[in-house]
Every structure is written in C-alpha cells, then in structure tokens.
Image: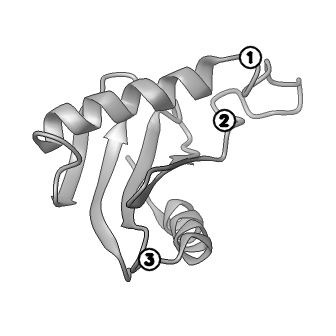
Amino acid sequence: MPGARSAAVIDWTSGLALGADGDPPGADHETGCAEIAELARLAAENTVFAPPPATTTPPHQVPVEDLVVTTGDGYHLVRFVDTGFDSSVFLYLWLDRGAGNLALARIRLRELAGRLVLA
C-alpha cells in the first residue's frame, strides 16, 4: 500500500501482535502494539463509542468499525475484524501522511478485514 510505514494484526485483549512488519511505531513492535491495543480496547469497550449491542447484533461483534488518529507526519488506522468467536482482533496500519492516501487505506483495510480468516 503506498505510504505504508508499518502494519500489524493485533489482539486487543492481550496487546500481543499476531504479526507485524515495517518500521515499529515507537521503540519496537511489541511495545507499539501493546499501546495501540490500549486505544483499541478503550474505543471498543467505551459505551460512548460502542453502546451495548441490540438484541439483533451478533454477540461477538464489535460495533466500532475503525479508528483514525492523525499526527503531523502520519495516520494511524485501526480496523476491527469481526470474527465468529470473540472479535478481539484488529488490523493496524501506520501510513505516511505525505505518501499515503487515507481514504484508499481505509477501503483496503476494510477489504482485508473482510477476507481475513482467523481460526
């Protein structure tokens, strides 16, 4: 993806990276992923962003679709992945602000999340 600096698949309940590549956001991938997981957990569990599910919502679906954090030189994107078990996984992308396209990155992450198979 043009402008991608780093990408990871992260479990937001544990903060562990299931896979990561590129420049780590911060000191290293493990620390960066744990810190990003804190942000994801806050959004996923906060009733302001994620009200309690309606009776028609699947029991493990996270109602937050994605998060975008902008900085002076980049975008940090979190895309939650709906799974059949606990939906505690998300995709993370660190995108260079000058070289990347935020709209395209969001579309691609949504497509990737839809195709991701977790067992």
Residue under pointer 1: 47
For label 2, the residue is 61
- Looking at the rendered structure, the secondary structure element under dot 1 is loop
At x 42% / y 52%, what residue is drawn?
A: 91
55 lies left or right of 12: right
**Badge 2: how crowded within 10 Å, few (<14), some, or many (20+)?**
some
Going from N to C along the chain, the mark reached first, 2 or 1, is: 1
Which is more foreground, mark 2 or mark 3? 3
Q: Quadrant of residue 58?
A: top right
Counting residues from the N terminus, which is met first, the one under dot 2 or under dot 3?
2
**Residue 85 place in picture, x, y as percent:** 52, 33
Q: Residue 53 location in percent, x, y? A: 80, 24
Measured Cα–Cα span from mark 2 to mark 3 = 29 Å
Q: Nearer the viewer, residue 95 or 15?
A: 95
Give the residue pinned by disc 3: 100
- Is residue 22 positioned above or below 17 on the image? below
- Quarter where residue 34 is shown: top left
Question: Quick check: 58 left or right of 61?
Answer: right
Secondary structure of the residue carrying numbered label 3: loop
Q: Amino acid at mark 1?
A: Thr
Q: Residue at x 57, y 70 (%)?
A: 111
Q: Residue at x 18, y 32 (%)?
A: 31
Specify the quadrant of the image occupied by residue 21: bottom left
Marks 2 and 3 close (CB-CB < 8 Å): no
Instruction: Determine whether the residue tagged by mark 2 lies in a helix, strand or loop.
Output: loop
Q: Nearer the viewer, residue 56 or 6?
A: 6
User: In the rendered structure, which amino acid carries the disc numbered 3?
Assistant: Gly
Residue 54 spot, x, y in % from top left: 88, 25
- Seen at 38% across and 83% down, the residue is 2
